[in-house]
Image: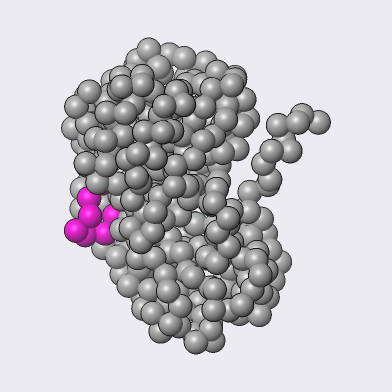
Amino acid sequence: TANRLNIFTESVIRGTTRLANQHGAINLSQGFPDFDPPEPLLAGLEKATRGPHHQYAMTWGAPRFRDALARKISRFTGLQVDPDQHLVVTCGSTEAMMVAMMTACNPGDRVIVFSPFYENYAADAILCGAEPIYVPLRLPDFHFDEDELARAFALKPKAIVVCNPSNPTGKVFTRDELVTILRFAEEHDTFVITDEPYEHIVFAPHEHVYFSALPGAASRTLTCNSLSKTYSITGWRLGYVHAAPEVIAQARKVHDFLTVGAAAPLQEAAVAGLELPDSYYAGLRDLYTRKRDVFLGYLRQTGLPFTEPHGAYFTLVDISSLGFAHDSEASEWLIKEIGVAGVAGSSFFREPVNHLIRFHFAKNEDTLHAAGERLLKLR
Ligand code: GLN
């Protein structure tokens, strides 16, 4: 088999879910909810199963879905979005990222990735023959050093990946930080590939700034996004790339030959989500703020240090005091002996970091209480 497959491992996130299921642990590893999507999506799904939506949708996205998506993106970014020119609908942000990377990069190109990072980014770069280069996000607030970023840009990368709000750090990039990234990208003529599935899960007083909406950013930004987290439909696999028409024309080719298209009945059903009023998003923010407070409340009682997310639904817990040589042993022990699954932090870092476990709190409050009670044994 191909040599490039020896440069990265299987996803530790998805592997941890399998181990959690095998041992019946409460799964706070792979981030997905244990509650249903909003009612209009369920009704939409029921209706879609009886409608004429059982064959391929148009490859770059069903027209009704793209129309609703364009309106929804406009509503939050203030940008004019033409459903026929600015969008390609993908199978989740996972495919969107792969499409974006293949659209932007030639084999041999470099791609800047902030570390820690969501593990797909390195694999995506390698799969399209590119080389990830890393810029650390420094504790305690996961800021980047401008000189380090300058040195990475000096290597003439073709693209930079910005996950915002960030998985696994919970960092929400400030406008100033994003403008700094944009200035470097302009200076070196670099694409900016953003991954923003947690756009609506941001905790006050923090606010999400859309990179694509920064003045001058639109022509070089490939925004990858997903409906998974916003509407609690991770299994529907619906995402998209939003970019300038010239870029989208190329991205559509990549997407078409990768997957032909996202599931037609699910695109139809998801229109109801895209049309939900602003109050839905305010409610989502409140819901996740409560979940964060419940879960972090238990962590505080364990006495273990942890990161306070500004957005997304992850926290990195420092398990140094538990005395494990490697975080993967700690993760396995937590699953088998404590009954709660989290992801070994090392899988997110370029640097040799071995003392963190990532937990997510996208669960019903009952589940969070049950997991929290178990974690209290770590006191
Ligand atoms: N983004 C979620 C996580 O990091 C789910 C990732 C996935 O498995 N697609 O856990």
Q: Decide: is 257 above or below 229.
A: above
On whether residue 311 falls in the magenta region, the answer is no
Residue placed at 41% from the left, 27% from the top? Answer: 154
On whether residue 202 falls in the magenta region, the answer is yes
Q: Position of residue 231 (x, y in %)?
A: 38, 49
Q: Can see residue 37?
A: no
Colour logic: one colour
Residue placed at 29% from the left, 46% from the top? Answer: 173
Figure quadrant of residue 295: bottom left
Q: Decide: is 360 above or below 52.
A: below
Q: Position of residue 103 (x, y in %)?
A: 49, 20
Q: Decide: is 276 above or below 260.
A: below
Q: Decide: is 223 above or below 290.
A: above
Looking at the image, residue 337 sits to the left or right of residue 212; the answer is: right
| Residue stretch in magenta | 201-208
Q: Can see residue 301?
A: yes
Q: Position of residue 296 (x, y in %)?
A: 38, 73
Residue sitting nearer the eye, 35 or 363: 363
Figure quadrant of residue 145: top left
Looking at the image, residue 379 sits to the left or right of residue 20; the answer is: left
Looking at the image, residue 247 sits to the left or right of residue 355; the answer is: left
Furthest toward the right, the residue is 1
| Quadrant in the picture for the N terminus | top right
Residue placed at 57% from the left, 30% from the top? Answer: 131
Residue placed at 21% from the left, 41% from the top? Answer: 176
* Magenta stretch secondary structure, dominant: loop
Q: Position of residue 174 (x, y in %)?
A: 24, 46
Residue sitting nearer the eye, 278 or 143: 143
Residue sitting nearer the eye, 141 or 378: 141
Residue sitting nearer the eye, 376 or 235: 376
